[in-house]
Image (spheres, rainbow, N blue to C red):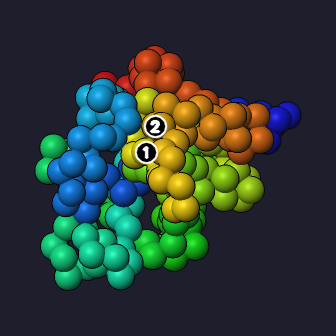
Amino acid sequence: MGAKTKEPIERSALLVIDVQESFRADPDRWARRSNPAFEANLTRLVDAYREAGLPVIWILHTDGDGPFRPESGLVRVQDWLQPREGEPVLRKTTRNSFTSTRLAEVLAGLGARRLSITGIQTEQCCETTARLAGDLGYDVDFVTGATATFPIAHPDTGEELPVDQIARNTEFALRGRFARIATVDGMVEELAPALVG
């Protein structure tokens, strides 16, 4: 990605990955998430994309694990932020948002060649989607401030990797290889000239 020309913001789509009630099924775990400003940051970015008339695409994760099972009733967007009519909502069964969905087809139909990655979890489905998107030739903005994650416990020792370290590791791994690391403020500022009026 290093020498690639940056796609204009008008060719961008916002991916909101796995911001679903499944993650709030365990209130104690949800309380330990990173990024206390997650909800406000993501709301601000979704609003900016909508105001600019650019696509917002919602991805939901399903698998056989408790709150992620389709029949759990929890595989739905968290109630503080909802898709609007006409905004695609795709369900996936893989960590990345491409392999088990029609995402590439939807993006092609929208003419989107640049993606802003947001959602849950920073180092799992968000990072995995960013890596694959970069490999597929998309221009990727990874908006860490609009992602959230949880501490990771080592299965053998119980030692926990703290959330700040997880986000930092993700940024180090993605920067300049698969994505640009973007801020919410920076994206909103870039979106401002594209506002439909």
Q: Quadrant of residue 185?
A: top left
Task: Spot the residue most to the right.
Answer: 3
Decide: is 32 above or below 71: above
Whether residue 83 can be seen here: no
State the CA–CA distance, disc 1 to disc 2: 5 Å
Whether residue 168 can be seen here: yes
In the rendered image, the quadrant that contains the C terminus is top left
Task: List x then y, in percent, for residue 47.
Answer: 29, 33
Decide: is 48 above or below 119: above
Q: Looking at the image, how many numbered discs can be counted on the residues?
A: 2
Q: Which mark is residue 179?
A: none
Task: From the viewer's side, name the closer residue of 6 and 69.
Answer: 69
- Give the amino acid at mark 2: Val
Q: Give left or right: position of 90 versus 128.
A: left
Task: List x then y, in percent, for residue 106.
Answer: 48, 64
Q: Residue at x 46, y 37 (%)?
A: 163
Contact check, label 1 and label 2, Cβ < 8 Å:
yes
Decide: is 197 above or below 100: above
Q: Residue at x 70, y 41 (%)?
A: 173
Q: Residue at x 45, y 76 (%)?
A: 93
Element type at mark 1 = loop
Which residue in the protein does label 2 denote?
163
Tell me if mark 1 has few (under 14), some (14-19) or many (20+) residues whose alpha carbon lies within 10 angstroms of its own.
some
Q: Give left or right: position of 87 versus 2.
A: left
Task: List x then y, in percent, for residue 39.
Answer: 26, 35
- Give the amino acid at mark 1: Pro
Tell me if mark 2 has few (under 14), some (14-19) or many (20+) residues whose alpha carbon lies within 10 angstroms of its own.
many
Task: From the viewer's side, name the closer residue of 128 and 29.
Answer: 29
Q: Which mark is residue 151?
A: 1
Task: List x then y, in percent, for residue 3.
Answer: 85, 34
Q: Give left or right: position of 136 versus 32.
A: right
